Amino acid sequence: MRDDPIQDAELRRLCERANAYAFIPPIEPTTRVGGKKRCKMATKVKLARGKEFVFARAKGFGGEIKYPWDEWFSGDLLLLERSEGPENSKGTVIEGQETTKRDYGVPRDAMPPKIKTAARRRYKIVQISRRDADGAPLDHEGLIIKARDMTADERIEEDLLRAEEREAAKAKKAGAGALHVDGSTQAVA
């Protein structure tokens, strides 16, 4: 509290007025599982007789997959070209009447990381080139790609890398680093 008793009393009155109108949520139903209390049990889903629930695969924001990854990662040598037209502030081509739609609309420098990430999720290795067979730059900010399946050893290495990334994300989320006086952090072993 403060040194001034008048300000102290005013602060106390303000807190009492604010707390008088505060919402206190009702106590949620609890259950005991393994000797521990758990809040709000999962509810069983009831379906009409003869109906079966079908899990749909999640898709992009617009309800459709943005790029045909499986088609692109078939193993064929493919030329991907950037759409042409007006761009937004991030350099992505805006779809409209004056847009020439091609394979992708993001800036060419942004596409290789997207391709490599999508390939990695599907256990594929992708080679990407910005030049044709003669070494000349491709038209329409194009990219030539060729994908192949990961070998058994590469898959094991990929699984280990994914496990490390998950652990790092958990540690980051949990704040596993100890904060020092100088502001640096050190991992806790």
Image (spheres, rainbow, N blue to C red):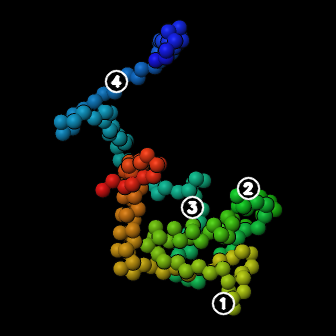
Hey, what amino acid is under mark 1? Ala
Image quadrant assignment for residue 127: bottom right
Could you tell me which quadrant the C terminus lies in?
bottom left
> Mark 1 or mark 3, which has the lower sequence index?
3
Q: Which residue is mark 1?
A: 133
| Residue with the mark numbered 2 | 89
Residue 67 in the image: above or below residue 1: below
Asked whether the residues under the numbered discs 2 and 3 touch, taking CB atoms below 8 Å apart as contact, a structural biologist would say: no
Quarter residue 134 falls in: bottom right
Badge 4 element:
loop
Q: Is residue 13 visible in this depiction of the protein?
A: no
Circle 4 or circle 3, nearest the eye: 4
Crowding at dot 1, Cα within 10 Å, few <14 / some 14-19 / many 20+, comes out as few
Q: Residue furthest left?
A: 35
In the image, what residue type sits under mark 3?
Ile
Give the secondary structure at mark 2: loop
Three-letter code for the amino acid on which mark 4 is drawn: Ile
Label 1 close to label 3 by CB (< 8 Å)? no
Are dots 4 and 3 in contact, CB under 8 Å? no
Residue 117, horizontal then vertical, whole percent: 51, 67
Q: What residue sits right under mark 4 in the picture? A: 27
Picture coordinates of residue 82, whole percent (x, y)? 70, 70
In this picture, residue 90 sits left or right of residue 46: right
Of residue 166 and residue 124, the one placed in the foreground of this image is 166
